[in-house]
Image (cartoon, coloured by chain):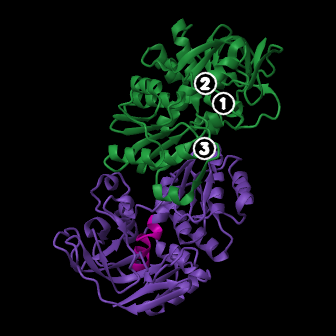
Chain colours: A purple, B green
Amino acid sequence: MKATFIHGSGDIRVAEIEKPSVIEPTDAIIKITATCVCGSDLWPYRGIQETSEPHQMGHEYVGVVEEVGEQVSTVSPGDFVVGSFCLSDNTCEICTDGYPSRCVNGGFVGEAQAEYLRVPLADGTLVATPGQPEEDLIPSLLAASDVLGTGWFAADEAQAGPGKTVVVVGDGAVGLLGILSAKQMGAERIIAMSRHADRQALAREFGATDIVEERGEEGVAKIKELTGGLGAHSVIEAVGTQQSMKQAIASCRPGEHVGFVGVAHGVSLPGDELFGAEVHLMGGPAPVRKYLPELIRLIFDRAIEPGKVFTKEVALDDIAEGYRAMDQREAIKVLVRP
Amino acid sequence: MKATFIHGSGDIRVAEIEKPSVIEPTDAIIKITATCVCGSDLWPYRGIQETSEPHQMGHEYVGVVEEVGEQVSTVSPGDFVVGSFCLSDNTCEICTDGYPSRCVNGGFVGEAQAEYLRVPLADGTLVATPGQPEEDLIPSLLAASDVLGTGWFAADEAQAGPGKTVVVVGDGAVGLLGILSAKQMGAERIIAMSRHADRQALAREFGATDIVEERGEEGVAKIKELTGGLGAHSVIEAVGTQQSMKQAIASCRPGEHVGFVGVAHGVSLPGDELFGAEVHLMGGPAPVRKYLPELIRLIFDRAIEPGKVFTKEVALDDIAEGYRAMDQREAIKVLVRP
């Protein structure tokens, strides 16, 4: 089968490798219907994260179950499934506490930009959809696999909800879907921090009520101005840089909540600023599996259309072009069809 | 009247100054019954925090109201009162949201190691006790003014409660009262990280079920060993150093809660460690005023005796000796009688 490998900075190649097969009795093999390129894939693509040796890429996926191990009971061959980018047994103490992304028996998916994928802990990682989805739902279901689930987690931890003013730092796909999530949770006002016209348009479509183009201290000053000097109740951080983290924390009013999901690179938070900000700070890999049943229902009900973040589609053979387009910010997010 | 000044590292002096009087109509003047030396007073005393010019010290106090401004309505001359170390109007949006320590009209008390104290925003800062307290309750009421309220806040934000395993980093008065607070909140198991025999004894008296003497990575390993490899549900950080903060975060299981109240000095938290820890992190100046009515009730009911942290008492004239004894760790906390 065909699979995607990174060989180094800017070097994405598709190679022919052996099709995966069931190894553990809890495995499932799925035929990938759609996969995509993640903002976090750009860290190694840009050389900010080192690639010591060539390895497979991809952790977002939807597809059809082809084969299952003998202990798998919740999904069967022929089922259309959405999976989390984190593996989880969904039964351990951490999973049942609501954090399957930190399952004691878990791990990460890393080989999804391919024709087939072996998913360990299939029962605890995959969720079958209620019947085969219509073709136009596939991008939205794919988004649920990571980018929507991650935005949803950030909004959930930021306690977005009725009466709340929400600030979203970052206008990539996760930030945009953080807006959609906050809107779905009933937030009263959603301020998107963005300076790209195309993303501002999608932000408004997803529910943003205000756009702030300023960044850093100027951005914080603008947020304070819009919130009676107090800052926002809920702040979603979806970038992962020093500037974005400090901007998120400083935009939050004392006692309130910041959910951060940008994978931190080169971030160092001064303790006195954290003490002085006095906000609830929570983030990490999103427990997508926890949210999947609800997200799938919302997508099947056509209540949300997160798939709009896919502004470009390529065939698996052309995935290098997908990486390039995302790196150059020509596309918000790129869907890949094996 | 007599008041305490710091002139520089290790240099504490008592001087005669004018007695304060009502300036604003929301002020109260109280005659201090007892005040004390705080762990945070040791930062400038040790020269870790610079003293650019001599200034008054002290932010913990109980006393009797002597005079009030014309707008003060909740306390009257003759009332025995406990006050927060933070000033608050208790009516602004941040106060009513539960964070009076961050009142938009607030500030900090800084002149309490004296015979008299002017308290601005008296209605929102002071709480009168139900009648004059018996003499033996005074140390406990004084503790409520900061050190108990701060430990209580840390335990509250760490979500200590029934079924929870709590870790307390720091065996100073705040850490010890964090133990008392967690016990009062119903925590199942309370692990005190301490290597001082006298403090271990008080920790056990306050409710600690386990003592861990190891620190840093060894301390974290021990906590993991005691918690089935997962870490604690609730972690109270009551020191404020790089080591204690990292130790606290690493001792917490994913998805759970760290309350930090040690005033951060030289702390810098790597973003990737925060992302990897995936814990709820919250801390800052404690909203003591919010807890005062409940804490006063518990003390009057003799359900708790936080005053046990005062292991030494001095007259105001001898307060320099109080600083010295705390600095040398000869006393856990020093009560001062004007």
Question: Circles 1 and 2: CB distance less than 8 Å?
Answer: yes
The Cα atoms of the two marked residues, 2 and 3, are separated by: 28 Å
Tell me which residue sits at (32%, 63%) in the image: A88
Q: Is residue A304 visible?
A: no
Chain under disc 3: A
The 10 Å Cα crowd at callout 1, few under 14, some 14 to 19, many 20 or more, is: some
The dot on residue A278 is 3
In front: mark 2 or mark 3? 2
Mark 3: secondary structure: loop
Where does the magenta region start and end? A138-149
Q: Quadrant of the C terminus of chain B?
A: top right
Judge by depth and name the residue closer to the eye, A233 or A96: A96
Q: Do discs 1 and 3 belong to a common subunit?
A: no
The dot on residue B326 is 2
Q: Is residue A247 visible?
A: yes
Q: Is residue B154 above or below residue A236?
A: above
Residue of label 1: B42
Q: Do discs 2 and 3 belong to a common subunit?
A: no
Q: Quadrant of residue A215?
A: bottom right
Q: Quadrant of residue B327?
A: top right
Judge by depth and name the residue closer to the eye, B44 or B258: B44
User: Which amino acid does the dot numbered 1 rest on?
Assistant: Leu
User: Which amino acid does the dot numbered 3 rest on?
Assistant: Glu
The 10 Å Cα crowd at callout 3, few under 14, some 14 to 19, many 20 or more, is: many
The dot on residue A13 is none
Q: Where is residue A35? Give x, y as percent.
A: 41, 81
